[in-house]
Image (cartoon, rainbow, N blue to C red):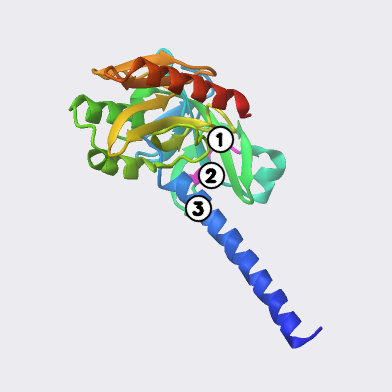
Amino acid sequence: MSTMSYSKVILKYLAFIIFIFIHKEIQAQSRLEVGERINGPANIRDTVNGNVLFSLNDGVLIETSPAINKWLKIGVYVKLTGKQIEAFKLEKNIPLINEDGKTIGKTINPLEITMIEEEEVGYIEAYTHQDNINMAFNPELQLMKILALGNYQKKALEPYMKKFGFTEYTEDNQLKFTQYFIYESTVVDLSPLERITLLFDKQNVVGYFHTRNMVVKGFKTHELVRGHKLSVLETMANQDVKSLKQKRNAYYNSVD
């Protein structure tokens, strides 16, 4: 192999390594820096009001389902040993460690691992009471508070969008509005669509798609397919509402 060919191989290999590193960093950032948080310490149980499986410390980042009768399912990512991966189970009375190596809680009883996310990282799920969730980090509640003030300008929503990690939505480009979204929780769907998508007409929010119940004065909610909803300003023209519903339902029905 010539020196030039060997150099090209090395460069391609380095580029591949850099790509993998960046991809993992993005994955880790989305899990570790954006999400809902525990109001704790909190006991996490095998079912509603059931046996305690593990506890989580205050402020731990989690995934959540919608609450039903004040109980919800939560999920959290933890580091695993080779033995735990092989057994697909965590032992009782051991610390729970996140990807940064920080202790975030402890197991009380043995529990099964829900999913192996990547090498040495697992995902576990169980139930807790809604009082154990810090609502300052609930995206629906915080959005409702902002919109209730009647300020629909994008600049008023930008701190909120940054806090919860909204990114521009490009999958469905049939709509005339600019869209920013966050994913639904892994607890709800292992291959999630959006949890909230904000719709902007130029610099003002005119509506949002969502999966969880939200009631805001001045907005009217319409049911869509597959558990999704559309809430728009009550002043939006009926023709525009009809178009939004038809196009978004078609999109939801076209994806897995």
Q: Residues within 10 Å of mark 1 (few under 14, many from 20)?
A: some
Describe residue 79's horizontal placement relative to residue 217 as left or right: right
User: Looking at the image, which is closer to me, 227 or 79?
Assistant: 227
Residue that appears at 69% across and 81% down = 7
Rendered-image quadrant of the N terminus: bottom right
Please give the range of residues in magenta: 91-97
Q: Residues within 10 Å of mark 2 (few under 14, many from 20)?
A: many
**Label 1: which residue?**
124
Q: Position of residue 174 (x, y in %)?
A: 50, 32
Based on the displayed image, in which of its 4 quarters is residue 232 positioned?
top left
Residue that appears at 60% across and 23% down = 253
Q: Position of residue 73 (x, y in %)?
A: 49, 25
Describe residue 25's horizontal placement relative to residue 237 as left or right: right
3D distance between C-alphas at marks 2 and 1:
8 Å
Q: Position of residue 11 (x, y in %)?
A: 65, 75
Q: Which mark is residue 78?
A: 2
3D distance between C-alphas at marks 2 and 3:
17 Å
Disc 2 marks which amino acid?
Answer: Val
User: Looking at the image, which is closer to me, 146 or 241?
Assistant: 241
Q: Which mark is residue 84?
A: none
Disc 1 marks which amino acid?
Answer: Ile
Q: Are marks 2 and 1 in contact (CB under 8 Å)?
A: yes
Front of the two marks 3 and 1:
3
Residue that appears at 33% across and 18% down = 237
**Label 3: which residue?**
26
Is residue 188 one of those drawn in magenta? no
Based on the displayed image, in which of its 4 quarters is residue 243 positioned?
top left
Q: Is residue 242 visible?
A: yes
